[in-house]
Image: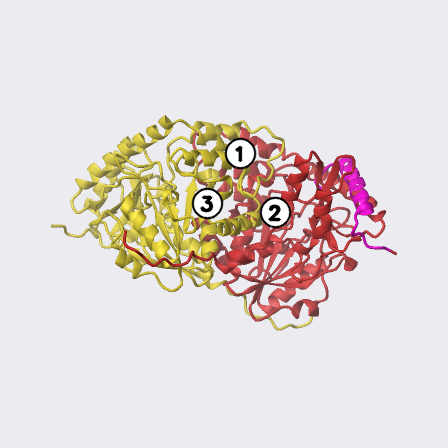
Chain colours: A red, B yellow
Amino acid sequence: MPAQKTAPSPALSARGRGMPASPIRKLAPSAERALARGMRIFKLNIGQPDVATAAPFIAAYRGFEPDVIGYAPSDGFKSYREAIVRYYGSFDVEIGTDDLVVTTGGSEALMMAFAACCDPGDDVLLFEPCYPNYIGFATWLGVKTSFVTTTREQGYHLPDRATIEARIGPRTRAMVVCNPGNPTGTVHTRDEIEMLADIARSRGIFLISDEVYRELVFGDAEAVPVLSLPGMDQHAIQVDSTSKRYSACGARIGWVTTRNADLRAAMLKMGQARLSAPTVGQLGGEAAIGLPDDYRRSVVAEYKGRRDVLVKRLEAMPGVELAAPDGAFYIMVELPVDDTNEFCAWLLEEHDHGGDTVMLAPGEGFYGTPGLGTNEARIAYVLDSEDLDHAMDVLESGLAHYPGRKETS
Amino acid sequence: MPAQKTAPSPALSARGRGMPASPIRKLAPSAERALARGMRIFKLNIGQPDVATAAPFIAAYRGFEPDVIGYAPSDGFKSYREAIVRYYGSFDVEIGTDDLVVTTGGSEALMMAFAACCDPGDDVLLFEPCYPNYIGFATWLGVKTSFVTTTREQGYHLPDRATIEARIGPRTRAMVVCNPGNPTGTVHTRDEIEMLADIARSRGIFLISDEVYRELVFGDAEAVPVLSLPGMDQHAIQVDSTSKRYSACGARIGWVTTRNADLRAAMLKMGQARLSAPTVGQLGGEAAIGLPDDYRRSVVAEYKGRRDVLVKRLEAMPGVELAAPDGAFYIMVELPVDDTNEFCAWLLEEHDHGGDTVMLAPGEGFYGTPGLGTNEARIAYVLDSEDLDHAMDVLESGLAHYPGRKETS
């Protein structure tokens, strides 16, 4: 073999280097060590509900009859899209089967929406604390992010219009709102959503509304569907998912809807590139979508009971501050510690409450602005009320014993 | 409501506008009209095998016992990754469970690999005719494409090294080879793959090898796994899928493997952003991966029989030219017509062979260089030999009756 000049090893891309670590999953190694020590971990870090998957959904897997698990159409099975159209009609949102693309979870819906709105170097405006994977998808696509901060004191509701508009730059192509919110559980008011719609129209940008927790609202709160607002056909993109509604996270079935035909055509071509969303999961989604309303009511009642337990326990802990959420199954809490990254790791590495400990998601990764969220953590109430109550005992004793605890007045 | 200046409707992104239409699926409207007229269509346009899904794969769906279809780990179930490691060991490729990420089909594996290698504006070098969705994924990610042309006369094997190196520019970050090839069925020789590896090393770029048709090789041909080559740990990325091997296209399960730890870490973070690949599909893949070799042999024998039928029939048609393929289940054919876009549409719109017609994928979309492929079409042999033989009758009569037929010597 002739001697040959060898170039250095190739470098990965800047976006590959810049991909954020998931704040929800980054403590997994500490958790593994805790399990190896024989600890029992109450996992409140991840939005994986313990609630049983809706029965018709799972029955579609067990009853799958064809000999071949073949591709589905790139925009999803027609019968499923028809069922989704009827489901939207049940809350007075009129769409057609050609307004949506069935996707591999809400995740892929966001990957399509961001790319259809934004070229590399454009940016999306996020409301922090936000679902951290918005930042991940943007980075994956070479899209920048900018942030409007919401606060616990304001219940994580939106600031005034001027504050939001001040963050819209010349390359801002879309705002992304999660309603009900992850990680906050905040249900935005109709006034807030109408304000965002009006900003989108007046500034000529898109409004992406992530409504995967739509049905999970408590009391009188109402999560206004972006597609119900007039004058938004060209601007509104709605992201949806079966994961939380039917406790079917592993099915990876969602969809993205817009009445903007050009935008939908672009997302369909992305859909054709990746061929299809999972076939059997779509059958599950179609089987579950017609569930009577008592299914939804029973799920909402279960989560509301859990929220009530958590809020009562957390409000009784000295130095703990929170805004009681109206929806989804998350609470952002401020803890009396300097750095929740360290505290959450300490819970797994050092804390031992009779063999038990608890896993939370440190708050920093839910913010884009450096320095924010360092005293916050997200709690997902994905265990039953009894376990949650016990997990709060574990957390309370952790706060009492943590060497880095701050003095509270 | 106060009068308000309204900006124009937002424009979608340039990449959204630039997404290519799928050559495999773009004739679907013509096909729907043919079906509406009562025609029977022999669909040879799409790589959706009629072969039954491997029995253990489908049994994992029917036998799914847990109450919850929950998320899988972002890199895939450990037990599945261990099974993949053993499977690679069976053909002497040594990898570890932390060298791979289980993905939503080979499609997502490519979305991760392209993004980890390339920033927006960088380019990937493709060998045309190529799998058209490489161009789709690149466009989705803001990555450019450049092309090295292979020809039917050379059996779609690679040209010499100088021709390839001449197409590598300052922003070329990766070459993508599909082996065995889609749409050509060409199995590249060891010399060819070693040449690409040597180019990758000497030029400091990545080599992405799409090996989803690995087992589907006929006769003495051997598809050399890129991960079996020495000195390529930093450069080689391998894309794999269960779709074709087990006829499980709709399961959407694949994986991406590299021994480059930084690259794998970046792809895992993308995996964390999108949470997980489908859960039950992974159980299917794990159940099927240990199938004894007689499963593979029976599938290969079936496809080889089909290839033999097709090659014999096509070679007997005046003016039809092809290179008999050694693998996968595709043939690129040159047809004696001016424009296969028009001819393939005509087959669906006008041709009627006793109530039957045939659907092919026009060749142009498999090329990046304008003007190439206009007299070619891709035939996927995804029907049994008897149906294929009849479909060739339909094609032959179509060529005989097509008004735009070219004179052949």
CA distance for labels 3 and 1: 16 Å
Which circle's residue, 3 or 1, is located before the other in the chain? Answer: 1
Q: Name the residue under label 1.
A: B79
Q: Is mark 2 on a helix, strand or loop?
A: helix
Chain letter of mark 3 equals B
Residue A401: give x, y in percent of width and height. 81, 45
Which SS type dominates the magenta stretch? helix
Q: Nearer the viewer, residue B148 or B45?
A: B148
Q: Name the residue under label 3.
A: B256
Q: Which of A8 and B380 is in front in this view?
A: A8
Residue B274: give x, y in percent of width and height. 56, 48
Residue A164 seen in render? yes
Residue A243 falls within the magenta-colored stretch: no
Instruction: Give the residue drawn at x 73%, y 41%.
Output: A358
Q: Residues within 10 Å of mark 2 (few under 14, many from 20)?
A: few
Label 2 amino acid? Gly
Q: In this view, does B320 lie to the left or right of B246?
A: left
Closer to viewer: mark 2 or mark 3: 3
Q: How crowded is mark 1: few (under 14 residues within 10 Å), some or many (20 or more)?
A: few
Q: Name the residue under label 2.
A: A89
Residue under disc 3 on the same chain as residue under disc 1: yes
Closer to viewer: mark 1 or mark 2: 1
Residue A66 seen in render? no
Quadrant of the frame with the N terminus of chain B: bottom right
